[in-house]
Image: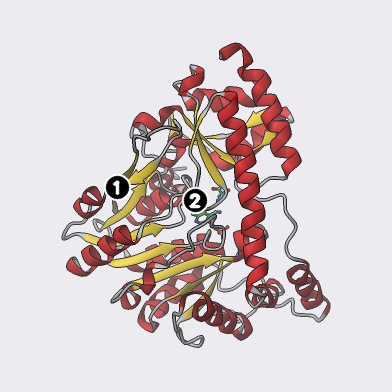
Amino acid sequence: METTGPWTRATAAAGLMKDGEARPTVFARMSASAAEHGALNLGQGYPDDAPPPQVAEAAVEAIRQGRNQYPPGAGEAVLREAIAEHQQHWYGLTWDPAREVLVTTGATEALAATVLALVEPGDEIVTIEPFYDQYAALTGLTGAVHRTVPVTSVAEEGSGDLVLDIDEDALRGAFSQRTRLVLVNTPHNPTGLMLRESALQAIVDEAERHDALIVTDEVYEHLTFGTSHRPIATLPGAQDRTVSISSAGKTFSVTGWKIGWITARPELVTAITGVKQWLTYSSGAPFQPAVAAGLGLPDSVFHDLASDLRERRDLLTAGLREIGFRVSIPEAGYFTVADAGPLGEGDADALAARLPVEAGVVGIPLSAFYRDGNAGAASSYLRMAFCKSRETIERALEKLDAWATPRR
Ligand code: PMP
Ligand code: GLN
């Protein structure tokens, strides 16, 4: 039976078609490898942390109260109101919870429904490269053309660390008359980069000039280690053309709950709902009031999570540096980028396949976040997650140190 179709285009666009066979995502492969070899998993980005107790209790309570049947397609009113209040409280953005907020099955469904709703074959989508793997898959699914803005390593005085940034001229140059949307991800996975205000402004200027939509993936909005997150929708003139996407997964350490959301103007929400209702219709009934409770927690809960994560970032980056990797110090998120080049490992793809066996540690090659052949200098980079427990990070560092000793 012939089974090629949109899925094969999506799989190929995400770089997962190898020798005529479709491979699972890099996260699935590397987590399977961790399980197979009993290796410590600094690969897939999910935390070891428990959710805040108030959030967990609210979900248990909702199940006990019988909130177990289909929620409304747009999401429970209590959650839509909490999302609108959260955006007002943290960013000063005003949204009408009845018409400008849509609850989704994670940021993943929000991204898929948005792109499927608004992009026609041949339209261009601009993203930063490296990018979260789903972005390439969605361009393949819709038959869009993927234009990218490279993150480059910026020479650094003194410390010898890896410093990553995007070039704003390249950013402006990625737009054309065919640009339908620019998919912004800040804080950024995999690099932890937070786009500077001038870069955000350049995106808004170019989107206006080319009448393009801005879609912004802000799932790491609260996991910042110094500078606060600035949503692009807060820039003058941006709110009307921006679809902002976030999710509870990272903020409350509940990646398996898959509660995400969109805030946008009513006509955009209507279009996106027009696809979303044929994907899942709705999901996560008891988790929706629990996430609503979480969004209303005192600011200190959000700050404490970020500062605890920051300590683990420091633990992992200092340890990797000592072992001999060249490391980036991410400003936000779950991940650090470690260059294995100084340890004589130029091919991080091959290294990531060997590390679970040789060192008992899993990392993700950064090349997985690039289109085939585009990784360039990043070919020797690994993405390592520090959202794991201190004990896991410490044990992983010990194992990597033992592995690296003969290489130094
Ligand atoms: N966007 C980015 C940048 C991510 O890293 C992830 C996964 N953590 C997602 C979207 C998907 O989010 P969710 O788990 O809420 O579907
Ligand atoms: N967002 C997570 C990461 O980047 C993984 C999500 C997934 O497995 N699809 O590691």
User: Element type at marker 2?
Assistant: loop
Tell me residue 161's x, y (percent). Answer: 46, 34
Cα distance between the residues tagged 1 and 2: 19 Å
Q: Amino acid at mark 2?
A: Glu
- Does 208 sit above or below residue 312? below
Residue under numbered circle 1: 149
Q: Can you tell which mark lies on residue 331?
A: 2
Q: Residue at x 43, y 69 (%)?
A: 244
Of 367 and 146, the residue lying toward us: 367
User: Element type at marker 1?
Assistant: strand
Question: Does the image show residue 35?
Answer: no
- Does 350 sit above or below residue 333? above
- Does 294 sit above or below residue 49? below
Instruction: Report the mark closest to the observer, 1 or 2.
Output: 2
- Looking at marks 1 and 2 on the same chain, the residue that comes earlier in the sequence is marked by 1
Question: Does the image show residue 151?
Answer: yes
Tell me residue 17's x, y (percent). Answer: 43, 36
Q: Residue at the front extreme?
A: 158
Q: Is residue 238 left or right of residue 287?
A: left
Tell me which corner region of the image, top left, top right, bottom left or bottom right, holds residue 13.
top left
Tell me residue 387's x, y (percent). Answer: 64, 48
